[in-house]
Image: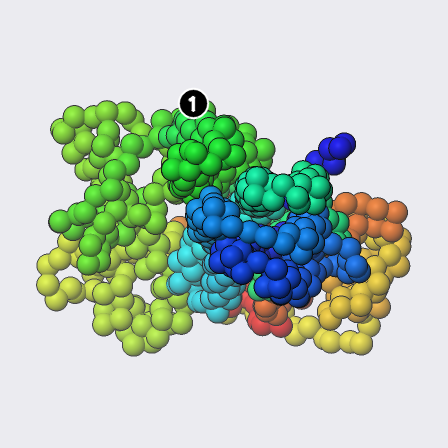
């Protein structure tokens, strides 16, 4: 007989473990029916004749009830009709032959009981144990896959939460005052860095989940299905052997029934194990699509792209993760290969003994060892795949950032004395006070900071060198903290507080009650000292802060102190305001629809007056006096000559100029793509407030390098108020200071 084409459940039946397992379980349970048949056959052989016919009829009925499930399973995709599996066809032949047998004796009864029934019982128990172990292995594989999926969901939730924290930090910047804005910005930057790390972990976890998914559906599950198929086919082979044995026993006893028994034997020989598997697969095959890969999902709070963050803080995290993954791969690769070779040898040995019933115990031992080894290697292979995906993902994005760096040799440590983290400078505290310490240089950090530590280990240091390095870091942090506190104190000395002190002190000097405690601790923004402050302020106790000369800003005097008479008030008219000298002109390169709130509709080629430019959006004024915002990339600036109208006399020079305070952008916007219809307008900042502006009451000529010229009626954007009686403003020709009494709010 020509051999049927090979059948592979792993390739043809995707994600079909449950129906295959149920089918295999039915086949194994069916062995009990066959065993019961032969036992009853042995018992009634003595009764012969009529009872033998009744027995055949009984099992015909049982077969008819189980015919469909034994042929194509309980839930076939296509009904078999009147067709039966090869095993059922053979079974039908046996029942027919039994009806033809008319006699039986005690020897046949004993032979059937000992050589067939007992063996069937052992096969049924043993193979049901094998099937349950396959089921356990499948459950373990599914649990591992679901565990990776759960880690992905957890990483997604952590990423959403971190995005929410970033948004809260950003909103806090908008709501904070000048004195706390710097701290809020630093907190926002730290949260951004943390969000980048969480995002990278989330993207890496997506790749890990996708690889685990593919391995589960393309490698692990097909292997289990093929093993179940082999188990079933081996069972059928053993069953064929026992059927043949029982038939041979009957042949010896029933010479007259040789023709019937030979027909039965030939029918059994046609029952190849692949025939049942092929028929089951044919009626259960269905259309199946592999589940789609996981993709990056942007947070509903923080709109982001699926690209990994590769700035300097992120590269520190990625470098540490890359090194950790490489070390993990080195430790697991050899172990996985060794255990894989052991599994291959066990599989070869089982193939040699699975059909030899005389080696029953060896078959049991080898099969159990094989399944145990497959379960044992599962966790190691899973970790190795995770490390490989992490390494491949990081190398494809930023390359081998770990090359040429000296990483810290961290070791888990429980700190028994108060210790500060060398990265974030915060105390390592808690019930366990656990963290990490570099065994080479003594660098200490939180467990949460381990992956953020730059790879700048100086190498192995002795105890004295470690102590000196710690002291140097401590002094550096102390100096940074001191500088930070001075800036905070000086920024808190606003004009309102100084004005109230000025009033409390009688108008000529600042009152010691208000100025002695703050300004004696830190210098002013300009860094200048005022002699009158030290003479008026009397500290209550000699402190280190009192030794520092009290610094004070110079309050700009009102104009009537040095102007004979103010110019006549500016007459307001209904005509559009003229462009003041020094204000930039621009020309629209593209037409802008201006559909959003505060946006201005402008046609291509229109000349506009530039009022303000923040780098992304530009406030412009048309010739008809209408104002609004347009994208900066839509405007081409035009150089215009600057005229200098008469100015009022300049105020006296300040003792020291306040430093320039420039705002650093939170995130650099990528250059827009210029298309045929103009580049897309930039996204407006969320939560943006109305820009404060002031208008010049008088003309002013600067006397210092950090001051700016202004004309009467000119408008400016306010950058900082109350800088010692001066106001820092932004104009078209730059930034600088103007007297606070020369301007009024718009």
Q: Position of residue 590 (x, y in %)?
A: 85, 52
Nearer the observer, 198 or 534: 198
Nearer the observer, 690 or 236: 236
Query: Quick one: quadrant of the N terminus?
Result: top right
* Residue 340 shown left or right of residue 571 in the figure: left
Residue drawn at (23%, 69%), measured in percent from left and top? 512
Q: Position of residue 224 (x, y in %)?
A: 55, 44
Residue that badge 1 annotates: 404
Per the image, label 1 sits on a secondary structure element best described as loop
Q: How packed is label 1: few (under 14 Cα within 10 Å), some, or many (20 or more)?
A: few
Coloring scheme of the render?
rainbow
- Above or below residue 336? Residue 555 is below
- Above or below residue 413? Residue 522 is below
- Above or below residue 513? Residue 400 is above
- Above or below residue 456? Residue 497 is below
Residue drawn at (24%, 29%), measured in percent from left and top? 440
* Residue 41 shown left or right of residue 567 in the figure: left
Query: Quick one: quadrant of the C terminus?
Result: bottom right
Residue drawn at (34%, 49%), measured in percent from left and top? 448
Q: Position of residue 367 (x, y in %)?
A: 44, 39
Residue drawn at (88%, 59%), measured in percent from left and top? 603
Q: How many marks?
A: 1
Q: Position of residue 318 (x, y in %)?
A: 47, 38
Residue 548 in view here: no
Nearer the observer, 151 or 281: 281
Nearer the observer, 619 or 5: 5
* Residue 674 shown left or right of residue 418 in the figure: right
Residue farthest along the top direction in this orientation: 404
Residue farthest along the left direction in this orientation: 541
Residue 624 in view here: yes
């Amino acid at each position: 007989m020509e051999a049927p084409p090979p059948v592979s459940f792993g390739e043809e039946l995707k994600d079909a473990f449950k129906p295959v397992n149920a089918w295999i379980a039915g086949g194994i349970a069916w062995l009990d029916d066959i065993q019961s048949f032969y036992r009853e056959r042995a018992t009634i052989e003595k009764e012969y004749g009529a009872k033998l016919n009744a027995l055949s009829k009984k099992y015909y009925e049982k077969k008819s009830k189980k015919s469909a499930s034994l042929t194509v399973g309980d839930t076939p995709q296509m009904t078999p009709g009147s067709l039966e599996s090869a095993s059922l066809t053979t079974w039908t032949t046996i029942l027919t032959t039994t009806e033809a047998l008319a006699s039986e004796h005690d020897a046949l009864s004993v032979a059937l009981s000992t050589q067939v029934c007992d063996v069937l019982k052992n096969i049924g128990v043993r193979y049901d144990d094998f099937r349950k172990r396959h089921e356990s292995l499948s459950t373990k594989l599914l649990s591992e896959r679901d565990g990776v999926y759960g880690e992905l969901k957890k990483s997604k939730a952590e990423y959403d939460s971190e995005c929410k924290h970033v948004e809260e930090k950003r909103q806090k910047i908008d709501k904070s005052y000048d004195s706390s804005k710097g701290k809020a910005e630093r907190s926002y930057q730290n949260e951004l860095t943390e969000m980048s790390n969480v995002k990278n972990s989330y993207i890496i976890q997506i790749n890990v989940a996708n690889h685990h998914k593919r391995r589960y559906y393309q490698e692990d599950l097909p292997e289990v299905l093929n093993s179940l198929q082999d188990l079933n086919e081996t069972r059928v082979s053993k069953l064929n052997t026992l059927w043949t044995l029982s038939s041979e026993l009957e042949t010896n006893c029933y010479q007259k029934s040789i023709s019937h028994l030979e027909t039965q034997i030939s029918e059994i020989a046609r029952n190849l194990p692949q025939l049942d598997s092929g028929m089951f697969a044919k009626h259960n095959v269905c259309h199946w699509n592999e589940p789609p890969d996981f993709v990056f999902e942007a947070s509903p709070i923080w709109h982001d792209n699926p690209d990994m963050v590769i700035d300097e803080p992120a590269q520190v995290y990625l470098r540490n993760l890359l090194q950790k993954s490489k070390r993990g791969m080195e430790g697991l690769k050899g172990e996985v290969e060794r255990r894989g070779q052991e599994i291959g040898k066990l599989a070869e040995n089982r193939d040699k003994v699975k059909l030899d019933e005389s080696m029953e115990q060896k078959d049991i031992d080898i099969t159990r060892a094989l399944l145990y080894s497959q379960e044992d290697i599962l966790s190691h292979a899973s970790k190795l795949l995770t490390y490989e995906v992490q390494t491949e993902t990081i190398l494809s994005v930023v390359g081998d950032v770990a090359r040429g760096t000296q990483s810290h040799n961290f070791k888990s440590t429980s700190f028994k004395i108060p210790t500060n983290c060398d990265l974030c400078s915060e105390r390592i505290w808690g019930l366990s006070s656990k963290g990490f310490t570099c065994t080479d240089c003594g660098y200490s950090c939180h467990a949460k900071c381990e992956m953020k530590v730059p790879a700048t280990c100086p190498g192995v240091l002795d105890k004295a060198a470690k102590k000196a390095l710690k002291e140097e870091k401590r002094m550096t942090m102390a100096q940074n903290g001191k500088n930070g506190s001075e800036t905070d104190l000086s920024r808190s000395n606003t004009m309102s507080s100084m004005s109230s002190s000025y009033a409390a002190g009688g108008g000529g000097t600042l009152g010691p009650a208000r100025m002695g405690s703050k300004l004696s601790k830190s210098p002013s923004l300009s860094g200048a000292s005022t002699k009158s402050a030290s003479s008026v302020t009397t500290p209550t106790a000699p402190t280190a802060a009192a030794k520092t000369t009290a610094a004070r800003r110079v309050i700009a005097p009102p104009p009537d102190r040095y102007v004979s008479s103010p110019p006549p008030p500016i007459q307001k008219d209904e005509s559009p305001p003229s462009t003041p000298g020094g204000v930039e002109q621009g020309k629209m390169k593209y037409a802008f629809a201006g559909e959003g709130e505060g946006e201005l509709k402008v046609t291509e080629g229109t000349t506009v007056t530039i009022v303000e430019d923040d780098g992304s959006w530009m406030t412009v004024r048309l010739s008809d006096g209408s104002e609004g915002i347009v994208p900066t990339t839509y405007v081409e600036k035009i150089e215009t000559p600057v005229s200098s109208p008469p100015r009022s006399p300049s105020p006296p020079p300040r003792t020291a100029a306040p430093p320039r305070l420039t705002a650093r952008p939170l995130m650099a916007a990528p250059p827009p793509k210029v298309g045929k219809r103009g580049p897309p307008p930039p996204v407006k900042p969320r939560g943006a407030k109305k820009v404060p502006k002031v208008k010049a009451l008088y003309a002013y000529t600067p006397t210092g390098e950090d001051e700016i010229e202004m004309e009467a009626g000119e408008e400016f954007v306010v950058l900082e108020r109350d800088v010692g009686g001066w106001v820092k403003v932004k104009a078209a020709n730059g930034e600088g200071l103007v007297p606070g009494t020369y301007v009024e709010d718009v």
